[in-house]
Image (cartoon, rainbow, N blue to C red):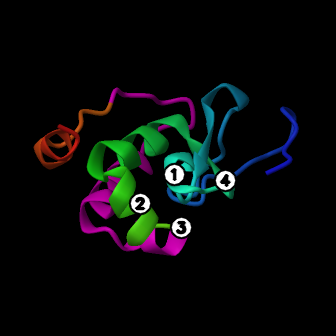
């Protein structure tokens, strides 16, 4: 993940170019669970991942891009967001399931 600001970076989830201001480094295994490896994601995709999945789920079941792409609710979001321009951003709302799990 050594991309410079002028490098073209493609989001591995939505396959769109990520403008420098929209790049978020996502820890595939959350830092709180000992993760170190990161991938650049669109900010909107990154926020949606964390809105749908808990840190424990990310560490145990969704620690790869391939696993994230297989998540049914994330697939629905990605199908929708792929139709948006690269600069598009919308706030993500945590799912009720994730909100309950964090209490």
Which residue has dot 3 on it?
Answer: 65
**Position in image of residue 19 (x %, y %):** 68, 33
Highlighted range, magenta: 65-91
* Nearer to us: label 3 or label 4: 4
Residue sitting at 58 percent across and 51 percent down? Answer: 27
**Position in image of residue 71 (x %, y %):** 32, 68
Q: CA distance from mark 1 to mark 4?
A: 9 Å
Contact (Cβ within 8 Å) of mark 1 with mark 2: yes
Q: CA distance from mark 3 to mark 4?
A: 10 Å
Contact (Cβ within 8 Å) of mark 3 with mark 4: no
Asked if residue 66 is among those painted magenta in the image, a careful observer would answer yes
Q: Which is nearer the eye, 25 or 45?
A: 25
Residue sitting at 37 percent across and 74 percent down? Answer: 70
User: Is label 1 in a helix, a strand or a loop?
Assistant: loop
Number of marks: 4
Which residue has dot 2 on it?
Answer: 58
Q: CA distance from mark 3 to mark 2?
A: 11 Å
Residue sitting at 56 percent across and 41 percent down? Answer: 42
Q: Which of the two labelled residues, at mark 3 and mark 2, occupies the earlier sequence position?
A: 2
Which residue has dot 1 on it?
Answer: 30
Q: Quadrant of the C terminus?
A: top left
User: Is label 3 in a helix, a strand or a loop?
Assistant: helix
Which residue has dot 4 on it?
Answer: 38
Above-or-below relation of 76 to 89: below
Q: Is residue 101 visible?
A: yes
Asked if residue 76 is among those painted magenta in the image, a careful observer would answer yes
Contact (Cβ within 8 Å) of mark 1 with mark 4: no
């Amino acid at each position: 993940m050594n991309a410079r600001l002028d490098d073209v970076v493609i989001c591995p989830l939505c396959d769109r170019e990520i403008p420098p201001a929209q790049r978020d480094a996502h820890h595939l295994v959350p830092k709180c669970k000992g993760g170190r490896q990161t991938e650049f994601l669109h900010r909107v995709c990154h926020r949606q991942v964390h809105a749908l999945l808990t840190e424990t789920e990310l560490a145990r079941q969704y620690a790869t891009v391939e696993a994230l792409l297989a998540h049914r609710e994330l697939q629905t979001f990605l199908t929708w967001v792929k139709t948006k321009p690269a600069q598009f951003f919308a706030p993500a709302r945590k799912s009720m399931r994730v909100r309950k799990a964090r209490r």
